[in-house]
Image (cartoon, rainbow, N blue to C red):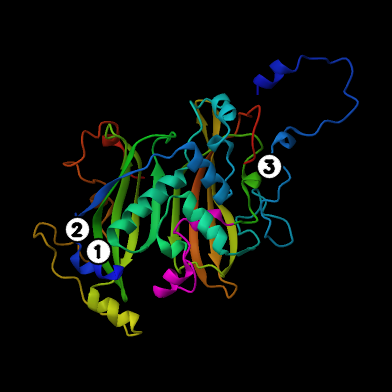
Amino acid sequence: MTTKSKSQPSRSAVPPPVVRPPVTDRSPFAGLPIASTGGEGPALDKNGPAGWSRPALNEIERGAIRRFAEAIGETNPLFFDPEAARAQGYRDVLAPLLFPFSLRSSLTLKDVAQPNRTVLSSDQQVEAFEPICAGDQLLVSSRIAELTQRPGNTGPLEFVVVEDEGRTPEGKIVFRTRRTLIIRAGREQPAAGGI
Amino acid sequence: MATARKVYYQALQLGDEMPSWQCPPFDRLQIVRYAGASGDMNPLYFDEPFARAAGFRSVLAPGALALAALAQTVHEWLKAPCLRRLHVKFLKIIWPGEQLVCRGRVVGKRREGGDYLVDLDVWMENPEGEMMVRGSGTAVLFYSAQDESQRLAGGPPLIVDDPAPPKPQEPARAAKSPGKAARAKPDRGKRPAPRKAAGKRRR
């Protein structure tokens, strides 16, 4: 909050003729659709009822599974090779246990944290009820399960517990995740990528 | 076939240690790949000036990479992607390039219907023996090779009730999931000097 004022000497006499874009527009990710596979309708308001956000449709693709598996250093052919996966009784390549963390929901961090705040995770949980395979369709909804503020060394900290769940189009539960995010609510960073 | 080397429920005992695994340190390339693949574009993972301005010494590794490393260690041990649940708390920030060792041990065994579940404590420590992340997981296993072949042939699961606990001084633990107190102390003996982690509680 202070670093920015240093770089902008105060010229209070004349208001700028052009309205500047808000700070978040400097983000290289601003404007990119986060819930690109989501449906219509508003995302959940964090001050709203503690319900689930509208489900976002995620089509599970082999390429996405492969990229995710590569990124976490997996080498098991179940995640890469459809034949190997079928030989083990799966419909198609299997998604790693953590793959649900890559799925899109209509509730994004932009709905949870103000722009340009640092966000850390304090814990993360995933629960799998059914295997996720390429070709599956999953409906992902999220909710804010808990929201608390506590004082911290650098100002107030917000602890936000976000839960996601994925279901088949028929409504069968496939996975549940739960994350606790620590957001430095009071401290805006001078420059940021996206959330 | 690889399934022949699977670890079965029958063979695991309370207190069994997972073979520890020194996972390759998370470097900036892997961190960025994870950010891209997961869509978690937290600038703390790739924007060094942002991370410094926020008071961190560098970018940091997403905690999910720690979960992934623990999941891989468990799957490598049990020879199947058998984890059904994994919950990890991040006790310290993981910086790029840190050497981390994944560890775990069996803390519970139970049968739910036809599912044989094994509860694990899992954790990662740095070379100084400090605990960096800590959590628990639940894996679903076949009871035995017979159970596996029976089920893969489309048959019903083999139902075997838990045998008597291996040690007489722990009579109550085999049947149900162990209580928090029982799970809250992983091996004091084997870990070298868990100085800072010694006082930590799980919840």
Q: Is residue A5 shown above or below A22?
A: above
> For the residue carrying disc 1, how many other residues have a C-alpha within 10 Å: few (<14), some (14-19), or many (20+)?
many
Cα–Cα gap, marks 2 and 3 = 48 Å
Image depth: mark 2 or mark 3 in front: 3
Q: Secondary structure at mark 2?
A: loop
Tags 1 and 3 on a common chain: no
Q: Is residue A190 shown above or below A88?
A: above
* The N terminus of chain A, quarter of image: top right
On the image, the x and y values in percent for residue B201 come to 32, 41
Residue hosting label 1: B109
Q: Is residue B8 visible?
A: no
Q: Is residue B85 shown above or below A194?
A: below
Residue hosting label 2: B14
State which chain disc 2 sits on: B
Tags 2 and 1 on a common chain: yes
- Please state the extent of the stretch shown in magenta in the rendering: A81-103
Amino acid type, callout 2: Leu
On the image, the x and y values in percent for residue A6 come to 69, 16
